[in-house]
Amino acid sequence: MAHFITTHGADGKTVFSNKTATKQNEFPIPLGSMTILYSTHKFPESLNKEQDLEQYTRDREAGFGPGVACPPGGTCGSILRLAPGLKSPMRKLATIGVFYVLEGEVTLHLDGGETKVFRTGDSGVLRGAMHSWQNTTKESARLISFSQSIADV
């Protein structure tokens, strides 16, 4: 997958960064894998000296660690691949997560007992939700997700 990020040249004009040419990794998660598209460790982020790009490059190569979907105090854009026939453990993230189903079908389970099936083209927002994902189909599903850390739930 090609991936491009903009930056600013010495003249202040927008150009494509040459600092992000390394391979993107898929990191295992309980239900499949996660590819980090971009991340920050604070919000709002400063773009001075491109420290955000250096941190993102480290995140993209090493991941956030087990159970972490978004850096505390930061943001994350990612692609999630949910393997067929699996259900993730119930968990609560200290984030607001916006997601869009790129392909496939997944079921979202909430601790209040509700479930909802999301199909290709569907989207949703998880606001500090205790939840689990399940892919009951025989095909992988892919979601794009954008998360921002929150102060409390």
Image (tube, rainbow, N blue to C red):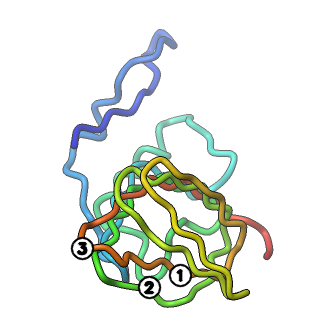
Q: Which residue is mark 1?
A: 132
Indicate the position of residue 122 as horizontal and vertical percent values: 53, 52
Residue 119: x, y in percent?
45, 58
Label 1 and label 3: CA atoms lie apart by: 18 Å
* Image quadrant where one finds the C terminus: bottom right
Which circle's residue, 1 or 2, is located before the other in the chain?
2
Please say if 17 is above or below 31.
above
Local secondary structure at mark 3: loop
Type of residue at label 2? Ser
Residue drawn at (55%, 74%) of the image: 108
> CB of mark 1 within 8 Å of CB of mark 2?
yes
The residue wearing badge 3 is 138
**3D distance between C-alphas at marks 1 and 2:** 5 Å
User: Residue 92: percent from the left, percent from the top?
Assistant: 63, 82
Q: Earlier in the sequence, mark 1 or mark 3?
A: 1
Give the labeled residue for mark 2.
88
